[in-house]
Image: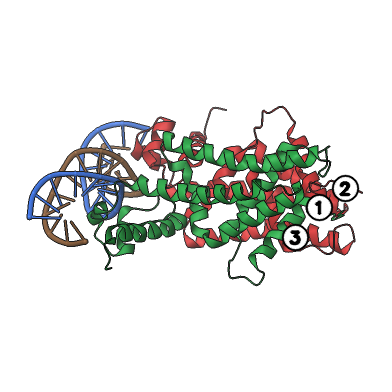
Chain colours: A green, B red, C blue, D brown
DNA sequence: CCTACCGATCGGTAGG
DNA sequence: CCTACCGATCGGTAGG
């Protein structure tokens, strides 16, 4: 019953510190020596637990984006009306950000430093995630719930912009509950500044 | 009438290539040797024209953010109704992005690599710019044009999210004119997906 | 703007 | 996981 998984545990510690440092200093601005110092190892000792620096980034980015995909899949598989599905997507999205602020910020900003092949995998996942929002907007227009006259592509890009910006200002321990924040964002998305609602 | 300003001209060439490289590889991911090769000099020769690497970033970021501030000042000094001022702010913002995509992307993503004192200057400018949007939203609520029930702070953060995301997808040579794109973004901001408008 | 170079730091490895 | 180290690359400089 003792720790037979010290190796895996060390790896998690390294990943945790890498997330912290990558989010603060960027991937290219963080050295393996920075990470080693943060976890209390000598630089060369890191390589007893990991293969290469980029492997850390790959794992962090993929874990992060998979969290969004998994949460989105749950929402998309429900048969709720488009506006309620949009609210659920935004709640799920903001919830994941709140649970893991630094990881999300690495996912959003550091994936560009991945090698070409690894970047392709990430971009494909991101496209799949974005298509969930496109689907909801298109469904809403088809159902007569959303404005048929709007530019659906630009509407989706606006929503993604709102959501991608959230990690820059959200404080998970702030006064308002996270779901409350998500719902106020959804209000803006649905009714805008004018605010006439059905 | 000949070029007496070769020095200043070389400096502009260096800045132009630095913008390109910083936007593609990031500030910390770009070496002075990368820049030297791009402008056709040997690495050490760059220092006949510039003082230090960070000086390049300082100048790029400040030029970029000043463009937004100057354009915003023009809009804010007009007495138009809040919704029209919002439309004008968004048009100005998208226009500047379209004119200088790579510079904008450096402004948005690389300012974090500035030293503490220089970063403070940039953050102050950014706060001033953001306050223009806050002012318009507050004016709109006070005038009864915008929904008094919304969370104004979150509304402003949503607008900034939309605008900060634009450099990631705008193609200045795309099918729709840039002002058209800006107006469709404004539509979303004002009336949302439901789209009831006054 | 080039030649020639500086000390520091980089990601990573061999051997134990 | 440490010792000891590798070649490559970093930002920047002296002197011309």
The residue where tag 1 is placed is A191
Query: Which chain hosts label 3?
Result: B
Residue drawn at 52 percent across, 38 percent down: A123
Could you tell me residue B2's position as x and y percent?
Answer: 54, 27
Query: Which chain hosts label 1?
Result: A
Kindly check if marks 2 and 1 are in contact, taking CB atoms under 8 A apart as contact.
yes
Could you tell me residue A39's position as x and y percent?
Answer: 32, 63
Mark closest to the chain's N terminus, 3 or 2: 3
Compared with A181, A104 (above or below) is above
Disc on res. B196: 2
- Asked whether, in this view, residue A48 is left or right of residue B181, the answer is left
Which residue is farthest right? B198
**Mark in front: 3 vs 2:** 2
Helix, strand or loop status at disc 1: helix
The residue where tag 3 is placed is B134
- Asked whether, in this view, residue B74 is left or right of residue B109, the answer is right
Residue drawn at 42 percent across, 41 percent down: A114
**Between marks 3 and 2, how big is the CA–CA gap?**
23 Å
Could you tell me residue B85's position as x and y percent?
Answer: 82, 50
Crowding near the residue tagged with mark 3, few <14, some 14–19, many ≥20 C-alpha atoms within 10 Å: some
- In the image, A3 versus B77, the foreground residue is A3
Helix, strand or loop status at disc 3: helix
Disc on res. B102: none
Residue drawn at 58 percent across, 50 percent down: B62
Crowding near the residue tagged with mark 2, few <14, some 14–19, many ≥20 C-alpha atoms within 10 Å: some
Residue A28 seen in this snapshot: no
């Amino acid at each position: 019953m003792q720790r037979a998984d010290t190796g895996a545990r060390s790896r998690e510690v390294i990943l945790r510190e890498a997330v912290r440092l990558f989010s603060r200093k960027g991937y290219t601005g963080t050295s393996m020596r920075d990470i080693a110092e943060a976890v209390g190892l000598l630089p060369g000792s890191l390589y007893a637990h990991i293969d290469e620096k980029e492997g850390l980034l790959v794992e962090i980015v993929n874990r992060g984006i998979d969290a969004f995909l998994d949460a989105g899949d749950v929402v998309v598989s429900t048969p709720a009306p488009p506006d309620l599905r949009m609210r659920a997507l935004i709640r799920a999205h903001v919830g994941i950000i709140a649970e893991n602020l630094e990881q999300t910020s690495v996912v959003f900003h550091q994936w560009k430093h991945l090698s070409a092949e690894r970047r392709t995998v990430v971009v494909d996942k991101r496209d799949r995630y974005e298509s969930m929002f496109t689907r909801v907007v298109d469904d809403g227009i088809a159902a007569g719930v959303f404005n048929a006259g709007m530019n659906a592509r630009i509407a989706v890009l606006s929503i993604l912009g709102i959501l991608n910006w959230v990690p820059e200002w959200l404080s998970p321990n702030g006064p308002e509950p996270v779901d409350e924040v998500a719902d106020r964002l959804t209000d803006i998305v649905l009714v805008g500044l004018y605010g006439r609602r059905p």
